[in-house]
């Protein structure tokens, strides 16, 4: 009995000392070990409550910084804060951020991170600023190949607004994984400015060489997802594709990709249920034939589509790079489409396939490539074995020459411009996404 009383006394004294340390700001008796995220995918937190769930409001898919054999970024972060802006596809009452250290061989040491609603430029609404933690700590080290969700924070996020994510890198870090086509201006500043109301900036990126410039950046580094706490019946549409899905050649900060246009048209479904359109496009990506611009669409299908919460619909628009770079036969793409359809259908996901855009007058133009593109589109239009066709080719075709994109809708006859993407997004029949009765 005496020993038991002694143990209770020691426990009471320890708890009292810990409470006093927290109240006075002095150190606790024993410092907590730093949080370290290990290699592998981030593990989703359990659902916080009945009727709600963590669902993607924004996400991107990463690739190595070497694309098609060419280094696309050699940017080093050192004692700097990066403030990224992301366009939300879903609103919610709480938020959390996914940090990623994929395709690297060095740890990513984060000295602090914040999330807030963006106001204009590099400025945030200070009243919405929230410091992020990782297992209760404000710093974290993410091991090579690993990713990690932050702890949730209370933040009222509205659909189709910009959220600022600020990350401080105290040491020197050279990322070898990124998302090249950010299409949103990010801002860099010296030191820890994660909680600053604004970060001083230079000129916006002037060129689309993927390198940005000055104190601004137009690529995505360090983070790959923003989730919000939203109703559990929310529907998620994934757009899986290449640079044309990614929105390449649309105006920076215009939120002008065709998935963005679709998202603004489809904020809710006809029965009032919330809808998020998540863009899983990667520039130069192949669907099946080669991993020279990140994992192929089929290789990343599990992570980018099937593992994503609440996916009800999938739009596939990918294959033109398999044709133009790898010169595959139509049957190679068709077999890959059929395999992807089967995998999605096994999870109860409806699949729509979009026709490939014309390529005449472009760097991809050759009689053989055009013949393959036309054969693949003929198979898509037949619509056998999947749930619907989205005929993007017809939307952008030059009426005087159906094998090329209208000249007013493109600069390179491969990628539509902002107007071209708007027409594509506006052409999609919203009835495709209505709940089956």
Image (spheres, rainbow, N blue to C red):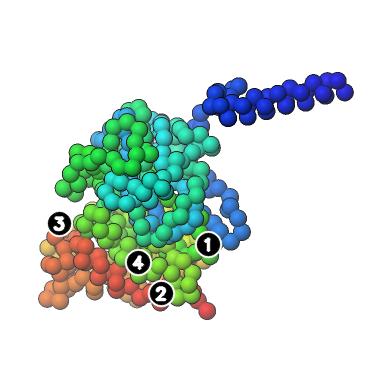
At 38% from the left edge and 39% from the top edge, which residue is drawn?
195
At 33% from the left edge and 58% from the top edge, which residue is drawn?
241
Report which quarter residue 4 is drawn in. top right
x and y, in percent, of residue 332 in the image: 33, 60
Q: CA distance from mark 4 to mark 3?
A: 32 Å
- The residue to which callout 1 is attached is 231
Element type at mark 1: strand
- Whether residue 295 is situated above or below residue 240 in the rendered picture: above
The one of 35 and 19 positioned closer to us in this rendering: 19
Element type at mark 3: loop
Res. 88 visible in picture? yes
Q: Earlier in the sequence, mark 4 or mark 3?
A: 4
- The residue to which callout 3 is attached is 363
Report which quarter residue 78 is drawn in. top left
Q: CA distance from mark 1 to mark 2?
A: 22 Å
Crowd around label 1: few <14 · some 14–19 · many ≥20 (10 Å):
some
Q: Earlier in the sequence, mark 1 or mark 3?
A: 1
- The residue to which callout 4 is attached is 264
Q: Where does the N terminus fall, quadrant-wise?
A: top right
Element type at mark 2: helix
The one of 432 and 66 positioned closer to us in this rendering: 432
């Amino acid at each position: 009995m005496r020993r038991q009383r002694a143990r209770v006394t020691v426990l009471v004294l320890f708890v009292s000392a810990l409470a006093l340390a927290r109240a006075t700001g002095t150190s606790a008796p024993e410092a907590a070990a730093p949080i370290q995220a290990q290699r592998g995918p981030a593990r989703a937190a359990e659902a916080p409550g009945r009727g709600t769930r963590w669902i993607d409001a924004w996400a991107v898919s990463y690739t190595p910084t070497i694309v098609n054999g060419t280094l696309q970024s050699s940017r080093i972060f050192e004692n700097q804060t990066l403030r990224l802006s992301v366009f939300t596809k879903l609103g919610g009452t709480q938020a959390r951020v996914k940090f990623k250290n994929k395709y690297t061989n060095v740890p990513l040491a984060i000295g602090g991170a914040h999330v807030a609603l963006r106001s204009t430029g590099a400025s945030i609404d200070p009243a919405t600023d929230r410091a992020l933690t990782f297992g209760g700590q404000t710093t974290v080290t993410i091991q090579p190949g690993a990713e990690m969700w932050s702890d949730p924070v209370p933040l009222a996020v509205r659909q189709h607004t910009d959220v600022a994510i600020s990350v401080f890198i105290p040491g020197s870090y050279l990322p070898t994984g990124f998302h090249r086509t950010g299409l949103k201006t990010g801002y860099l500043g010296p030191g820890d400015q994660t909680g600053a109301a604004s970060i001083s900036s230079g000129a916006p990126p002037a060129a689309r060489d993927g390198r940005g410039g000055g104190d601004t950046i137009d690529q995505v580094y360090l983070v790959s997802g923003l989730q919000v706490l939203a109703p559990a019946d929310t529907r998620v549409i994934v757009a899986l594709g290449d640079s044309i899905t990614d929105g390449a050649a649309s105006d920076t900060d215009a939120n002008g990709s065709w998935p963005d246009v679709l998202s603004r048209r489809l904020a809710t479904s006809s029965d009032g249920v919330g809808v998020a359109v998540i863009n899983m496009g990667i520039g130069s990506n192949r669907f099946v034939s080669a991993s020279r611009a990140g994992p192929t669409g089929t290789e990343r299908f599990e992570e980018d589509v099937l593992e994503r919460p609440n996916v009800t619909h999938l739009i596939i628009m990918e294959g033109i790079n398999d044709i133009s770079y790898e010169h595959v036969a139509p049957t190679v793409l068709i077999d890959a489409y059929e395999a992807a359809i089967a995998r999605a259908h096994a999870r109860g996901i409806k699949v729509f396939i979009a026709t490939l855009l014309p390529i005449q007058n472009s760097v991809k133009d050759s009689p053989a490539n055009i013949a393959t593109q036309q054969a693949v589109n003929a198979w898509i239009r037949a619509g056998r074995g999947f749930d619907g066709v989205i005929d993007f080719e017809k939307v952008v075709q030059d009426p005087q020459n159906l094998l090329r994109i209208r000249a007013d809708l493109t600069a390179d006859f491969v990628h539509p411009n902002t107007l071209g993407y708007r027409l594509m997004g506006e052409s999609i029949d919203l009835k495709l996404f209505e709940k089956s009765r």
